[in-house]
Image: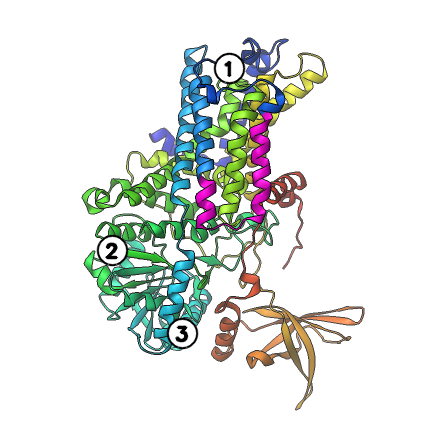
Amino acid sequence: MNFVKMWRQDVSWPVKAFFALSLSVCGTVLYLGRLNSQGPLDAYRQRPPISVPNTLPDFLTMPMGAERIILPFALILLVTAGLRFIKPNNLTRLILRPILILLAVRYIAWRALSTLDFATPLEQVLGLTLFGVECVCVLSAILNSFQTIFSTDGLRSRQADQYSHDVIAGEYLPTVDVLVPTYNEPEHIVRRTVIGCQAMDYPHKTIYILDDTRRSHIRALAQELGCEYITRPNNDHAKAGNLNHALEHIQGELVAIVDADFVPFRHFLTRTVGFFQKEKISLVQTPQNFYNPDYHARNLGLSDFLPNDLELFFGYIQPCRDVFNSVICCGSSYVVRRSSLDEIGGYFTKCCVEDYQTSLKMLTSGQRIVYLNETLSMGESTRTYNDFIDQRLRWLQGNWQVYFCGDELPLGHMTLGQKSFLVTQFIACIQPFLRLVLLVTPLFCIYGNLALLDATLSEILYYFAPFWFFSIAVQGWSTDYRISQFWYDVYETTFCFPAVGRLARLLGNPFRKVSRVTRKGIKLDAKNYNFEHSFPLIILLTLSLGCVAVQLVGQWLWLWPAPWDNQFPIYFWLGYNCLLIGASILSAVDQPVRRTMDRFPVTMPCRLVVAEQPGIEREYAGLLQDLSEGGGSAQFEFPLALVPGSEVQLWLPQENCRISGTVLRATVKRQDTVVSVQFPASLPLKSHRQLVRLLYCNMTHWKRRKKPGGLDALLAIVLVVLRLHPLLKRYRASA
């Protein structure tokens, strides 16, 4: 254990890289030394082609003739092609989800009855391990299919329409305490959030900043903005302790939690508060959406294409969990009844995160949590690879700790439907181990000369391909293309090795100390390649490409014949892994983050007010192109001579907003001029409030989610890997 600790903490990553590379070279030399005229997969060649075993029932037996073998796959392709013309709803999902379940059972039955005949004890152990992983994956797919047939999307929106009338009419106006917990977020982020909370259309609300780092400038910020300020002498139990301490000092009937990096929309409370007219409802959770692309999309140059990886959970999984009263509280953008919190003793403090665990405590006590699937707030997504990994490892540890809380979290009191989600969540926790097996198995087959999946191409097309392709198509279609299976595999591959390391350390002590709070509002002046974390993937990619190169070169030199029929599945599997690993490695190359304020494509008429002489101003009408809290750009359909550094005013007549700034640059293109204006670091409070309302407090077109199809996502992965955009893109020395 001491050696492991020393290796992890004291050995620099170049030394680790050299050691790993040395092992790879030694393994490759040994591998090349045992090659013979039969080629890399001699274990597969030594076996006769597989005949269909008699253990399979007649209705599962593979037929004779190529046209019959390909028929199920062709039918599935035909059905998936028609999915674009079918709207996903409770009825259509009820029809198609059982088909996926039948295909999953059909595939796993074939694997169990036809492919588990191994020649050596080592093949038996590793082959059964692979089969066990597949069984868990199929079980997860079946459970997920049952759990995600029905959704409460339409129901909750109709209820919000009805209940909001009472709130707007003033017939139901309980007092609401809006809590903004903050730990290390920069002041400008906290300021933005508080301004957004104050802009909410609701009369009986009180805003509190919960400063868990006791910063004097945050206290001064609260006084400047006119909100309340609460702090405490220590940081016991992190965010849960911070919230519990605040509960001792507030009196509102309802409590709204808005993390310091989120901004609620103006109608956030009018859409959520009305639900609490029903006494049985304890908490209303809304989605977490993000105004900036996550690090994957930004690093890969796909910011305008890829949805955030949490879109699947918030946009689809949560409304389906609502059917079973299994909604997860997600830490921000929710409203909770104060008496319901008091009933369970406040926020749950035993785990490293408080949200999921507190909602489980509420569910075990019989309370009702509902999910309103409407975008009512926007937050900041992680901007770098390290921040993403750090955040998700903390979430993983918190979810893992749930199963070790004993009587403090009595999971046995939950209903059967709620327990099924606990099983799904547990499988999600161990998913990194499952992904690791799927990544290394083809390498074991080739480098170890082991026949762990001895199936012909015909069998793969008949049994596996229909299930795999239908699963990919239905996953995208049923979620309204919130995420594709291909990108989900990339995310899992990226997270695999860090998560396996964290879980291995948690086996001895699930409640060990975890990492810090995720950084927000960061800047990055240059690329960061993150070799220390992505090196295991680089080694895997090197070994995988080496296998393919050996096969191709040996075949080209006539050292061995082309692969046999039962070897093609291994090489296809290896190629798919290479694609996932390549995309994961490239996504780990952080691109520079040079703006502390995100710019949004705001398009509206504007005027530029220029002081040409003392006391004489001239206005130029133009069209605003983009805007942020730090500046904006506008286009004018005529040449405009402006010197950088000139004092100007950007006037937005529609918003009745005038903001003073300086000209950053004025670029003349033919007869048009694009003027970039930089605002001062400290804006007047009135102007800042107007900007926050305009940029963050309403749903606008640039905040709509992306909807790439499955084929589009696959092509995007291929193009990213081929173009090597994160590696080849160049940046100017200064912003």
Which secondary structure, mark 2? Answer: loop
Horizontally, is 727 left or right of 5 in the view?
right
* Residue tagged 1: 52
The spot of residue 85 in percent (x, y) is: 58, 48
**Disc 2 or 1, which lies upstream in sequence?**
1
Q: Residues within 10 Å of mark 1 (few under 14, many from 20)?
A: few
Q: Which mark is residue 198?
A: 3
Horizontally, is 543 left or right of 436 in the view?
right
Residue 10 in the image: above or below residue 341: above
Distance, label 2 to label 1, CA atoms, is: 54 Å
Q: Residues within 10 Å of mark 3 (few under 14, many from 20)?
A: some
The spot of residue 607 in percent (x, y) is: 65, 79
Q: Nearer the viewer, mark 2 or mark 1?
A: 1
* Pointer 2 with pointer 1, Cβ within 8 A: no
Which secondary structure, mark 3? Answer: helix
* Residue tagged 2: 367
Residue at x 55% of width, y 78% of height: 655
Q: Nearer the viewer, mark 3 or mark 2?
A: 2
Residue 443 in the image: above or below residue 639: above
Q: Amino acid at mark 3?
A: Gln
Horizontally, is 292 left or right of 420 in the view?
right
The magenta-colored residue range is 70-97
Quarter of image, res 437: top left
The spot of residue 308 in percent (x, y) is: 51, 51
Horizontally, is 347 left or right of 35 in the view?
left
Residue at x 31% of width, y 34% of height: 507
Q: Amino acid at mark 1?
A: Val
Where the C terminus falls, by quadrant? bottom right
The main secondary structure of the magenta stretch is helix
